[in-house]
Amino acid sequence: MLEIALPDPDAFLKIKETLTRIGVASKKDKKLWASCAILHRQGRYYILHFKELFVLDGRPSDITIEDIKRRNTIAKLLEQWGLCSVVYTGALPQASMSNIKVVPHREKGEWTLLSKYTMRSERKRND
């Protein structure tokens, strides 16, 4: 998990929505699988790769260093866009942007946005 700080209370929902548009894409099908999610626990905020969420749930996960690099790169993008600041001050290994697709908000309707993980509260609402 990578801790972040939010500049204001509205940033949580902005980040949550933005993360639905960042991930791994199938350009021919115009499908995007979100790579990361934001988590709020005990007054702190974190960016997690979806495979880290499986670990938190006690489910099997095959998380790799490439997944962690992708998470770090996505967190740094959010920071560059002014949506958060990364709390960790050391060097973070980064993934190539060629491995990450960002769907602009104006193109959101043209893509099928998918998630490989559903948060517990969302699962309860959908059950």
Image (spheres, rainbow, N blue to C red):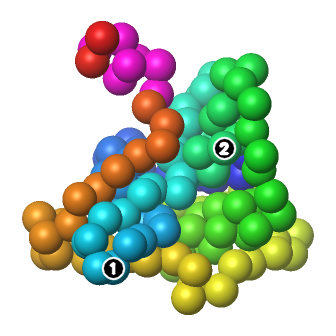
Q: Residue at x 41, y 71 (%)?
A: 25
Question: Mark 1 against mark 2, which lies toward the viewer?
Answer: 1
Q: Position of residue 114 (x, y in %)?
A: 35, 50
User: Could you tell me the amino acid type at mark 2?
Assistant: Lys
- Residue assigned mark 1: 27
- In the rendered view, would you say 16 is above or below 68? above
Q: Is residue 34 left or right of residue 114?
A: right
Q: Position of residue 89 (x, y in %)?
A: 82, 67
Decide whether residue 121 is among the magenta residues: yes
Q: Position of residue 105 (x, y in %)?
A: 21, 70
Q: Is residue 42 left or right of residue 11?
A: right
Res 87 → quadrant: bottom right
Q: Position of residue 10 (x, y in %)?
A: 32, 47
What's the CA distance linking mark 1 and mark 2? 23 Å
Q: Which mark is residue 51?
A: 2
Q: Is residue 28 left or right of residue 110?
A: right
- Please state the extent of the stretch shown in magenta in the rendering: 119-125
Q: Residue at x 45, y 56 (%)?
A: 34
